[in-house]
Amino acid sequence: MAMIEEGIADWPRASMAVIGSSLGGFYATHVAATTACRTVLLNPAVDPARELARHIGEQTAWHDPTQHFFFQPEFIGELRALEVGALPVPEQVLAIIAKGDEVLDWREMTVRYAGCRIELLEGSDHGLSDFEARHLDDVMRFIDPA
């Protein structure tokens, strides 16, 4: 998060936007809470500390199983430290949530982002494999309404 905050430090808050998917959605939620910028969340992780606690130890990279890394116990506390409560400007947040997400619970996401604009999709999947064809235009209009 420190790298993200450093990277966006000079971005103009009134016109900036962030988009995050899954764990990136959790990070984008933190940015939304601290900057009140326009934010799009795609099947966002609601409680990654809880979900990832069972993965402490050596892991393989999802995109390349030949790559290994060690998920350290202290990462759980770091994730907990990034949790935020209610978002200060929920109308600045769009959450696209798929009922067919095979990784995260759509019901938990809809509760977490109540008050935000939610597009609840029947079916689909965690990766929103139809994102470009079905959602990209709406996302672009949301982050740049002018």
Image (tube, rainbow, N blue to C red):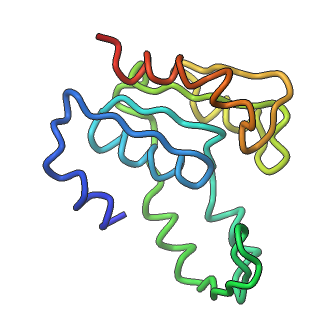
- Residue 12 is situated, as x and y percent measured from the top left of the image, at 15, 37
**Which residue is pictured at 30% across the width and 67% down the height?**
2
The single residue placed furthest to the front in the displayed view is 133
Q: Which quadrant is the C terminus positioned in? A: top left
Q: Which quadrant is the N terminus positioned in? A: bottom left
**Which residue is pictured at 72% across the width and 37% down the height?**
128
- Residue 24 is situated, as x and y percent measured from the top left of the image, at 53, 52
- Residue 28 is situated, as x and y percent measured from the top left of the image, at 44, 46
Residue 48 higher or lower than 135, as above or below? below
**Which residue is pictured at 58% across the width and 55% down the height?**
23
- Image position of 11 (left or right of 132): left
Frontmost residue, 82 versus 61: 61
- Image position of 135 (left or right of 144): right
Frontmost residue, 84 versus 138: 138
Residue 68 higher or lower than 20, as above or below? below
- Residue 95 is situated, as x and y percent measured from the top left of the image, at 57, 29
Residue 115 higher or lower than 50, as above or below? above
- Image position of 115 (left or right of 103): left
